[in-house]
Image (spheres, helix red, strand yellow):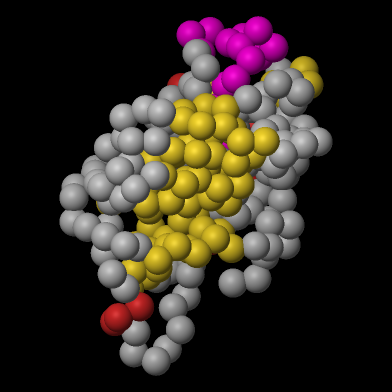
Amino acid sequence: MTTDDHTTRTLLLSQKAPGILLVSRGSTSNIDLIAANVASGHSQIRAFNLTNMTGQPYQFDTAGLRLGWGLRNSVGVAEHPVTGGIYSVENSADQITRDGQDIHENNPGEELNFHGYLNGTQYPPQGQNYGYPYCFAAWNLSEIPDNGNLSIGSQFSIDGPLPLTESLAKTDSYCATQIPPRLTFQAHLAPLDLVFNNSGTEGWVTFHGSWYAWLTHLLYPCP
């Protein structure tokens, strides 16, 4: 599982499903077109059962349970201590344009995403597409041309980089069908970790940021 650009991996051993290891893998570039192919394994979070290993290593691209794809670089991954829900915080793209206009200063937003459960609780969107590399979460609507009915956190499309052809370009209508974030943060905050308190009533997200590091405290109901 070699990767350029985002070379680090996030590992998390589940406390609610013993023996299950979560692995998050990022993209190979700012806009990684290979990630549009679910079989590539790029920009995905997967779960692997360590108790069922037969001596042969797992292949990340094809094995395990896919919790989500289209996740540019989900550096922080956490399990809710009560429900067992799996969350991640995602570093989004830079240098994006829309209708030829540079909107990268205040878009796209960074994301907190929900990926379902490992304990058997059903979550129909589990394993589905979160949009990347075609779709991103809106943050500053006033700077997005032709923003239509977008709101903060809405998935929107960007101008496609070469070799993306016009026939492959995605629209806001397509992006609206992808899994949206549960929470959207200001652009370029670079979230690095997510931690819940023991009761799961509070959560903390650390941000590296473009030029500084800081911490935000979240208080909201979690499934």
Secondary structure mostly seen in magenta is: loop
Outermost residue, left side? 121
Identify the residue shown where x is 69% and y is 12%. Answer: 143
> Residue 95 vs residue 77: left or right?
right
Identify the residue shown where x is 40% and y is 66%. Answer: 13
Identify the residue shown where x is 57% and y is 21%. Answer: 138
Query: What quarter of the picture does the C terminus occupy?
Result: top left
Residue 137 covered by magenta stretch:
yes
Q: Is residue 111 visible?
A: yes
Q: Is residue 92 visible?
A: no
- In the image shown, does 80 or 159 lie closer to the viewer? 80
Magenta-tinted stretch: 133-150
- In this rendering, the answer to whether 33 lies above or below 60 is above
Q: Position of residue 132 (x, y in %)?
A: 55, 41
- In this rendering, the answer to whether 22 lies above or below 129 is below
Q: Position of residue 9 (x, y in %)?
A: 59, 63
**Total number of numbered discs in the rendering:** 0
- In this rendering, the answer to whether 198 lies above or below 119 is above
Q: Position of residue 197 (x, y in %)?
A: 39, 44
Outermost residue, bottom side? 55
Identify the residue shown where x is 35% and y is 63%. Answer: 14
- In this rendering, the answer to whether 18 lies above or below 170 is below
Quadrant housing residue 16: bottom left
> Residue 35 vs residue 125: left or right?
right
Residue 22 covered by magenta stretch:
no
Quadrant housing residue 105: top right
